Image (cartoon, grey):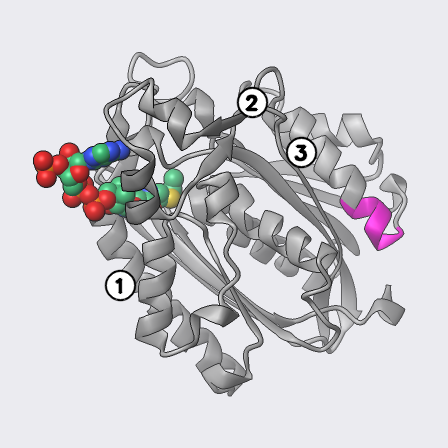
Amino acid sequence: MRTIRITGTGSALPGRIVTNKELEQMVETSDEWIRERTGIGERHVSVGETVVTLASEAARKALEQAGKRAEEIDLILVATCSPEQYLPCCACQVQAAVGAVNALAFDVNAACSGFLFALNTADAYLRTGLAENALVIGSEVLSKLVDWTDRGSCILFGDGVGAVVVKSTQDAPWYAHLGARGERDILWSGGMGSEERYLHMNGQEVFKFALETVPQAARTLLAKAGMEKEQVDWYVLHQANHRIVESVARRLKVPLSKCYENIERYGNTSAGTIPIALDEMAEQGLLKAGQWIMCLGFGSGMTWGGALFQWQDKEEK
Ligand code: ACO
């Protein structure tokens, strides 16, 4: 059976770092409150970098790691909810920047679940033979949608991008489960040009939603794969709040040490969190061939989802 495998990863972050201490000068908050309630210590914020420039940088790294030339890519998907420009889509702009002249390119918007939705779309294209090699990117510059006077939300978000190259292969196990529940008022933004552009969030409702859907998505994936939770080597959760990761781990009864976390350094980069984590883990040598990885996310929409797969075997590139 045709399935997909990740063969390369990359990431890119803006150079400017905003610490919690700096936020203390902007809104009534404290480093202590932010760390205790969210686990966040600092975040990267773009000064000139865009969804497209960061995505192109991450894409080049992922291509290099996968040993693929840009011309070999026949599908580019950019998951984003913070494009600076509506037309052309970010994926077409990345295509031009990296020179992937043979690719089909379009954007996917499922907010913080966006990378998993894009990965699942790539899976559908590759499984059915519509494409062979895809670049899947989660790219966000949410700092432009954040109301920097709202202490309830501005402390949470950061900018950043992660990218993966996936190729069509035979019989590599790959399971996915995604969902959407149309609900506008929990987490929304009017968009860049709108007077109501800023991100509005009911934090406690988002928290509740995550704990309702994410553990259930994990159980569904395990059932689909016929696996036990202990067989999963790494749980890579959307980095929205350390307390959410902790609560999901507790509900699933999996050790926190199996849940990769980097929220302390980046905050919530929305569609960027999962591919950034995968890139860091690959770079640190934490991901070994044959290991089982479960990625899980949730976001505005409201949307949620997960993917369960085995890490690449280098020889297969
Ligand atoms: N600094 C200090 N105090 C604050 C801050 C702050 N930055 N923000 C809120 N407070 C205050 C509140 O005003 C409130 O004060 P009160 O008790 O006097 O009324 C108190 O702290 C408690 O506020 P809560 O909202 O109850 O705090 P909570 O523990 O729920 O934490 C948080 C808030 C961090 C937002 C949490 O609810 C959360 O992380 N929710 C999930 C958010 C999330 O994941 N969003 C991203 C979704 S992904 C996407 O699609 C973009």
Amino acid identity at mark 3 = Ala
Amino acid identity at mark 2 = Ser
Above or below, 117 against 34 in this view is below
Q: Residue at x 57, y 57 (%)?
A: 120
Q: Is residue 20 left or right of residue 75?
A: left
- Residue 64 at what x, y percent from top left? 85, 46
**Depth-wise, is mark 2 or mark 3 nearer the camera?**
2
Amino acid identity at mark 1 = Glu
Residue occupied by mark 2: 46
Q: Residue at x 73, y 63 (%)?
A: 285
Q: Quadrant of residue 304?
A: bottom left
Residue occupied by mark 3: 55
Q: Which mark is residue 212?
A: 1
- Residue 220 at what x, y percent from top left? 41, 75
Can you say which quadrant of the picture contains the N terminus? bottom right
C-alpha separation, residue under disc 1 versus residue under disc 2: 33 Å
Look at the numbered disc 3 and give the secondary structure of its residue.
helix
Q: Can you tell me whether the CB of the residue at mark 3 lies under 8 Å from the nearest atom of ligand 1? A: no
Q: Which mark is residue 57?
A: none
Q: Residue at x 55, y 84 (%)?
A: 231
- For the record, the magenta segment spans 62-67
- Residue 216 at what x, y percent from top left? 34, 71
From this viewpoint, is residue 13 visible?
yes
Q: Nearer the viewer, residue 180 or 8?
A: 8
Q: Residue at x 75, y 74 (%)?
A: 289
Q: Is residue 194 left or right of residue 224?
A: left
Above or below, 290 against 69 in this view is below
- Residue 53 at what x, y percent from top left? 68, 25
Q: Quadrant of ligand 1?
A: top left
